[in-house]
Amino acid sequence: MKSIELVNALTYGGRSACQYPIDTFPGPLRVLFSVIAPFAMTLHVPGAVILGKPLFGWPEWAAFISPLSGALFFVIMRAVFGKAMKYYRSTGS
């Protein structure tokens, strides 16, 4: 499998996963979409606290810092992108 397919699976899979409540997924997918790629952290955790049903048994203050996980993920991915651009070589066409 090409690496671009892995990126597409995570990107489009994450977008599709955000259409459903994160607590309907099994544990490994919850970890994937709330810690590794924080789609659920920036969408479902604040929404659940607003509705009065905190997810994962986390305290309510987690909803207020969860948007920071999106910003942190952006900074990490920007650094990865910058590193990858150092090694990028054009085909010349």
Image: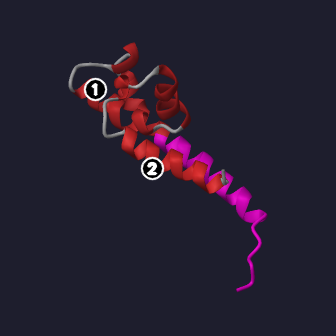
Identity of the amino acid at label 2? Tyr
Tell me the mark number nearer the camera, choosing from 2 and 1.
Answer: 2
Where 45 sits versus 12, above or below? above
- Residue contact at pointers 2 and 1, CB within 8 angstroms: no
Magenta-drawn segment: 70-93
Where 18 sits versus 86, above or below? above
Label 1, secondary structure: give it.
Answer: helix
Where 66 sits versus 10, above or below? above
Q: Residue furthest front?
A: 1
Residue occupied by mark 1:
48
Question: Of callouts 2 and 1, which one flags the residue occurring earlier in the amino acid sequence?
Answer: 2
Residue 2 spot, x, y in % from top left? 66, 54
Task: Based on the picture, tell me whether residue 14 belongs to the magenta stretch.
Answer: no
Residue occupied by mark 2:
12
Where 59 sits versus 86, above or below? above
Task: Based on the picture, tell me whether residue 84 belongs to the magenta stretch.
Answer: yes
Residue 44 spot, x, y in % from top left? 33, 32
Give the prevailing secondary structure in the magenta stretch.
helix
Q: How many marks?
A: 2
- Image point (28%, 26%), residue name: 48
In the rendered structure, the answer to whether residue 6 lies left or right of residue 71 reads: right
Q: Tag 2: Cα neighbours inside 10 Å, few (<14), some, or many (≥20)? A: few
Identity of the amino acid at label 1? Ala
